[in-house]
Image: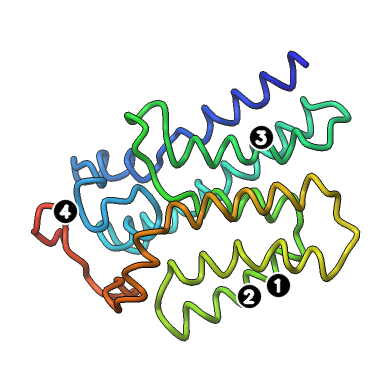
Amino acid sequence: MLMQMISLIMSYLLGSISFSVLLAKMLKGIDIRQHGSGNAGATNTLRILGKGPAIVVLCLDVLKGIIAVWLGKWLGGDAAWIPALCGIAAIIGHNWPLYFHFRGGKGVATTIGVVVTLSFLPALIAGIIAILSIVKTRYVSLGSLIFVALTPAVMLLLGGYPWPTFWSSLIIAVFVFFRHRTNIVKMVQHRENKIGSGGSSKGGKRVV
C-alpha cells in the first residue's frame, strides 16, 4: 500500500511540471498563461512560441503520461487499478499543477501518453480519427474530444481490455470534456480558434 501511495504522489508531482510555462519563461521571459488562450499546453505554445517549442512541449507532456503509468506498473504490485490511477494523477497534476498555483493546461498531451500506454490499439484507432478531424476542421479541441470519447468505445468494440483500463479511460474523458467546456461553447458559436490562426493574448495584444 505504501509503494502504491508513493507511485500516485510521484505521478501527480511529475504531472505538475508544466513544460509550457517553463519554456515560455526561459525563451521569452513571459508567463504563457497570460497570452493566447491562457492555456499552459502545446497548442498555446505553438501559437505563442512557434512550432519547435510546441513540439518539445508536446513530447515532454506525452512522456509525463507514459512515465506515470509505468510508475504504477513498477510500484503498484499486482493492483490492476494503480497504473491507471497513476496516469490520472499525472493528468490532474498537469491540469492543476502544485508548482504553478494550480493553473495548468487541459491535459490532452499527457492524456495521450497515459491512454497509449494503457491501451495502444484503441488509442491508435481513436487517434487516427481525431487527427483526420483536426485536418478537416482545424479544431484541435474537437480532435482532442473525439480522441478521448472514442478510445473507451473502441476498447468495448475490440474487447479483452481490463475493466480498470476501460473505466479509467472514461474518467479521463470526463476530465478532458470538463477542461474543454469553454471550447465546446465556442465551437457551437463558431468562435473557437482554428489551428494556424493567430489568436489574441489575454491582455488583448497578440504575441508573435
The span from disc 1 to disc 2 (Cα, nearest Å) is 5 Å
Q: Position of residue 198 (x, y in %)?
A: 22, 70
Tell me, for residue 86, which label it has, or none.
Answer: 3
Total numbered badges shown on the rendered structure: 4
Q: Is residue 30 above or below residue 44?
A: above
Q: Which comes before the other along the chain, label 4 or label 3?
A: 3
Q: Residue at x 49, y 35 (%)?
A: 93
The span from disc 3 to disc 1 (Cα, nearest Å) is 23 Å
Q: Residue at x 38, y 26 (%)?
A: 99
The span from disc 3 to disc 2 (Cα, nearest Å) is 25 Å
Q: Is residue 174 above or below residue 97?
A: below
Colour scheme used in the picture?
rainbow
Disc 1: which residue: 125
Disc 2: which residue: 128
SS of the residue under disc 1: helix
Q: Amino acid at mark 1?
A: Ile
The span from disc 4 to disc 3 (Cα, nearest Å) is 33 Å
Q: Residue at x 43, y 66 (%)?
A: 141
Contact flag, marks 4 and 2 (Cβ < 8 Å): no
Q: Amino acid at mark 3?
A: Cys
In-image side of 200 versus 110 (left or right):
left
Q: Amino acid at mark 4?
A: Lys
Contact flag, marks 4 and 1 (Cβ < 8 Å): no
Disc 4: which residue: 202
Q: Amino acid at mark 2?
A: Ile
In-image side of 72 versus 134 (left or right):
right
Contact flag, marks 1 and 2 (Cβ < 8 Å): yes
The span from disc 4 to disc 2 (Cα, nearest Å) is 32 Å
SS of the residue under disc 3: helix
Q: Position of residue 61 (x, y in %)?
A: 50, 47
Q: Residues within 10 Å of mark 4 (few under 14, many from 20)?
A: some
Q: Quadrant of the N terminus?
A: top right
